[in-house]
Amino acid sequence: METTLDSALRGAGLKATAGRVAVLGALDSMAHTDAERVYRTVSAVLPTTSIQSVHNILADLTAAGLVRRIEPAGSAALYERRIGDNHHHIVCTACGAVADVDCVVGEAPCLTPSSAGGFTVQTAEVTFWGLCPSCQKAA
């Protein structure tokens, strides 16, 4: 029986391997997570999985448009399943927590540069930095 994850993979032109299904399933339950955490989750289900395999699968899923990769300054690459809406992120400068921020103003790409230098803007990536509620309480 084909699952939603199998269909998503096949729809993106990828084979629905056990590793890809496991990684995609792990990302469905974890937003803004790094490859190491995905590996720990997947290896509990598929013990023969390697960290390199997880990195390769994440690269495949990102290239296929099933996963979004973000790279906040000073952080390992993070992956999420929320795709296709050009949302932004806010990162806690104390603990590194990451949260989604919907489009700030207007329609995607949300921001219009003062000069695009002849480029056609397709997306805008904005990262807000601040203190999360937990770190504000601790401060």
Image (cartoon, rainbow, N blue to C red):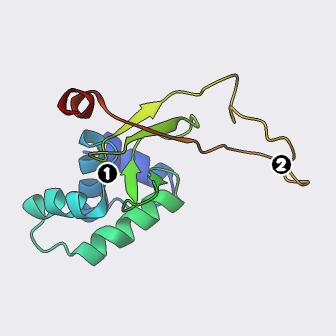
Q: Position of residue 104 (x, y in %)?
A: 60, 26
Q: Quadrant of the N terminus?
A: top left
Q: What crowding class fits label 1: few (fewer than 14 Cα within 10 Å), some (14-19), or many (20 or more)?
A: many
Residue 74 is drawn in which quadrant?
bottom left
Q: Nearer the viewer, residue 95 or 100?
A: 95
Q: Nearer the viewer, residue 112 or 20?
A: 112
Say which element carries label 1: helix
Looking at numbered disc 1 in the image, what kind of residue is underneath it?
Leu
75 vs 50, left or right, is right
Labelled disc at residue 83: none
Instruction: Find the distance from the CA under tag 2 to the CA under tag 1.
Output: 31 Å
Residue placed furthest toward the front = 139
Mark 2 vs mark 1: which is more N-terminal? 1
Say which element carries label 2: loop
Labelled disc at residue 24: 1
Q: Position of residue 130 (x, y in %)?
A: 41, 36
Q: Quadrant of the C terminus?
A: top left
105 vs 57, left or right, is right
Residue 53 is drawn in which quadrant?
bottom left
Q: Nearer the viewer, residue 54 or 110?
A: 110
The residue shown at (37%, 72%) is: 56
Q: Position of residue 124 (x, y in %)?
A: 66, 43
Q: Position of residue 112 (x, y in %)?
A: 78, 36
Looking at numbered disc 2 in the image, what kind of residue is underneath it?
Thr
Q: Which residue is mark 2?
A: 120
Is residue 16 shown above or below 112?
below
Q: Tags 2 and 1 in contact by the CB under 8 Å rule? A: no
Q: What crowding class fits label 2: few (fewer than 14 Cα within 10 Å), some (14-19), or many (20 or more)?
A: few
The residue shown at (31%, 32%) is: 132
